[in-house]
Amino acid sequence: MTTDPAPTTARDSVSPLAVDPAEAARHGLAPAAEPAEPGRVRALVGGTWRGLNAAEAALATLGEAGDAHWPLLPELPDRGPGAEPVGRTAALLPDLAVDLQPHGWRISPPGARSNGMDHRRATAHLSEDLHRLADTAGAEGIGIDRLAVRVVGPLSLLGSLWLPGGERVAVDAGARRDVAAAWTEGVAGLLSRLRTEAGARRTALWIDEPLAAAVLAGALPTASGYRTVRSVPRDEARTHWRAALAVLAGEEARASGVAPAQVWIDAGRRGCSAEEGPGPAELALLASEALPTPVAPAADDGRSGSAAQTVGVALDAPDPDVPAGPAAWDVVGGWSEAGRPLAIRHVAGRGPAALMRDVERVGLDPALTVGWTMMGPAVVGKEALRRTAQAADELEDRRTDLAG
């Protein structure tokens, strides 16, 4: 029996390639095998938008990303509490109720309703973003082959969330453990939603850790402001990252029938002076120590070795002529030569031409930039998205010219 086809959206028509009839269908997750695609320099197209129009942001993001680049699920914090990064991420935590207090997002006291107004509002904002993206893609006839999302990382969430007693989660070892475990479970569920609700066959995760250095240095102020929170041990931080990455991008993902997500750890130094705490190179080293076991590549991405890494770091485009430049280039070179992906933040004055000149200047093989992803500014508009995609395209052209 045949029926007339009905109009669909991306949420209604997930590609058969994206769903395994057995395990994946039961869990809403994609199978480990994906169709091969050639490696190239890509862009992470998206970020924080001004205004309230989720549909406009979705259309611009999908349009500028095209087939070659990663569209990033738009964020519209102007809609109010729960639409900003911390609230959006906190609402993902399963079995942990959160609410908004004057000093920030708090884990609700025992016995509090798990679906309070603040939590429901944050959840609704995220659902709207996903649905708008899927509906826009369906209306425009755009297939969502790949989709990325940004979340606040576990270390920064420990420094941003507050306990019922009025101190940061970072002060309590048991609370840190519970929040980190809930973060992993919640983010895994979010990646599943990218596949089932938006139809994405490939997913990527931008783990934004702006407070990583401050958490590790013990630089965050207590509630009173007179003292600082004791530093989280680096061994513990490494453990939190490693446990999360194993589930999201390592062999545990493969074992459960899930295509590992592409992940970038963006560890920053907000709230930490230049003299205290780990620098970018130390944070990158800590991330490398938390890497999961490499998984077999799902695509011919142009990188050497029998297995491709799916986890990398994000950093600003380094300038070799500033004091911190050589150390940053050591990070870029080390990660690139190891076949690990990198996200390079496109900054003013460090365009593709200058970047590729620096690649050759520091002795890095230009062919290794195939694992790079260009990132744009934090606050975006359509023109900023276009410039980021163009920067990636230009860098890719220069890479292929030098390789030829």
Image (tube, grey):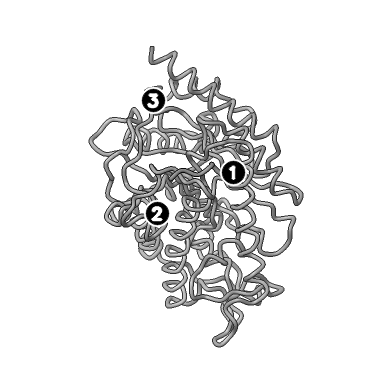
Q: Regarding mark 2 in the picture, which secondary structure is present there?
A: loop
Give the residue displayed 42% in from the left and 47% down from the top: 284
Outermost residue, front side:
1
Of label 2 and label 1, which has the lower sequence position? 1
Residue 230 vs residue 290, the one in the foreground: 290
> Which residue is identified by label 1?
7
229 vs 404: above or below: below
Task: Classify 10 Å Cα crowding around label 1: few (below 14), some (14-19), many (20 and above).
Answer: few
In the image, taking residue 84 as reference, residue 264 lies left or right, namely left
Measure how far apart labels 2 and 1 are at the Cα level: 24 Å
Quadrant (top left, top right, bottom left, bottom right) of the C terminus: top left
In the image, taking residue 386 as reference, residue 397 lies left or right, namely left
Outermost residue, right side:
51
> Which residue is identified by label 2?
29
Measure how far apart labels 2 and 3 are at the Cα level: 37 Å
Q: Regarding mark 3 in the picture, which secondary structure is present there?
A: loop
> Which residue is identified by label 3?
364
Quadrant (top left, top right, bottom left, bottom right) of the N terminus: top left
x, y percent for residue 324? 51, 38
